[in-house]
Amino acid sequence: MSQWVDTHSKGFPAGAAMVAYSRVILTAGLLQLAGASDVDIGCTNEDNFATTDGTETFPSGYQDVGVRLRTAMGTAKFIASGAITKDNPIYAAASGKVAASGSVLVGTALEDAADGTVFEGLRISQASNSASAGGTTSSTFEVDTDATTPKIALAGQTGGTGDYTTTLVPEATLSGDNTIIVPEANGDVLAALALAQQFSNKSIVELSEIVAATNVILASESGKTFYLNSATEFVSTLPAPALGLNFTFIVSAAPSGASYTIVTNASANIIKGNVVTSEDAAGDFETSGADTISFVDGQAVAGDMVVVHSDGTNWFAYGRSKVAAGITLTTAS
């Protein structure tokens, strides 16, 4: 039959001899000394011993022991397993004692203590003071589980290896209140980046980069816009073609002294497409396959641009320039 007490202490049958003020747990209904990884139910109020005169009243063969419950108001007494300094946290230790360090938080010391001495301490409700205290280690969890209001959920995965961490990092120096708004849930996806990539100094609306030197482009940068800006012109090398890869190149500083070039990896002749200009709507075109796109020195101007898309075999280019000679599609090798 269930029962309850409206007191600070409650009696339990002991499963072993123990001294007063020992942290204890219940195992199979009997008190045992709590270990360094145990969250105790409280501390014993008195010593207890095995009864051998036939007067024991519990099957354990030990006395009934009063326990000051860990939820009791006020302070409690503990046994130190080593030197403890007042006003510092105390943690669970072996043999029902407490220590100055550990993994299970018990409370705060209200006085100094030496190994084996009894001292006064203040209980604390949580069992950890780590940064993750109050969190969860579940692979799947949901905040607010009712069926009618908004909620936050993390879906679990059963395959693969590794861990998944979502971190929101504020700017280094806040100038005011910041708010992060996630799109409404109509199947929207913020973005999916390759491993080791971050949204550092990048726009969620458009991944962009100002390029001023030789650039070997990665497949994981698909969707990015490259702004070509340098007093010394350079080569940008496309990755191997793969279905869906796409990149945009825009001249932000007109080439002077040499041309900006965009080339295929391994000099493969797989660029097809056309260029339209303000001067000539027919523009230039390439249907056989080129390996180089050039923003031509002395011809290309700021704002000229080329977009390339891959079907997994070729690169298809669409360019726009101010003058007919501003952008060319050629075969260098």
Image (cartoon, rainbow, N blue to C red):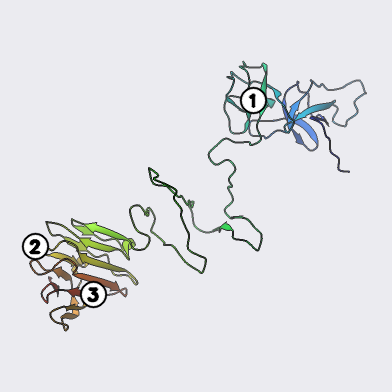
Q: Where is residue 28 in the image (x, y as percent from the top left)?
A: 79, 38
Give the secondary structure at mark 1: strand
> Residue at horizontal 65%, vertical 63%?
148
Q: Which amino acid does label 2 sit on?
A: Ala
Q: Residue farthest to the bottom?
A: 282
- For disc 3, the marked residue is 317
Q: In the rendered image of this protein, does residue 173 appear above or below residue 262?
A: above
Q: Mark 2 points at which residue?
A: 258
Asked if residue 116 shows in the view, the reply is: yes
Residue type at mark 3 is Ala
Which of pointers 2 and 1 indicates the residue nearer the eye?
A: 2
Q: Earlier in the sequence, mark 2 or mark 3?
A: 2
Secondary structure under tag 2 reads loop
Task: From the viewer's side, name the closer residue of 108 and 333.
Answer: 108
- Can residue 92 be seen at all in this image of the molecule? no
In the displayed structure image, the side of residue 191 where residue 298 appears, left or right: left
Check disc 3 and report its element: helix, strand or loop.
strand
Specify the label residue 98 is tagged with: 1
Residue 227 placement, left or right of 242: left
Q: Residues within 10 Å of mark 2 (few under 14, many from 20)?
A: some
Q: Earlier in the sequence, mark 1 or mark 3?
A: 1
Q: What residue type is labelled 1?
A: Val
Residue 14 position within the rendered picture, expressed as x and y whole percent measured from the top left = 81, 29
**Residue located at (15% from left, 59% from top):** 234
- Mark 2 / mark 1, whichever is N-terminal: 1
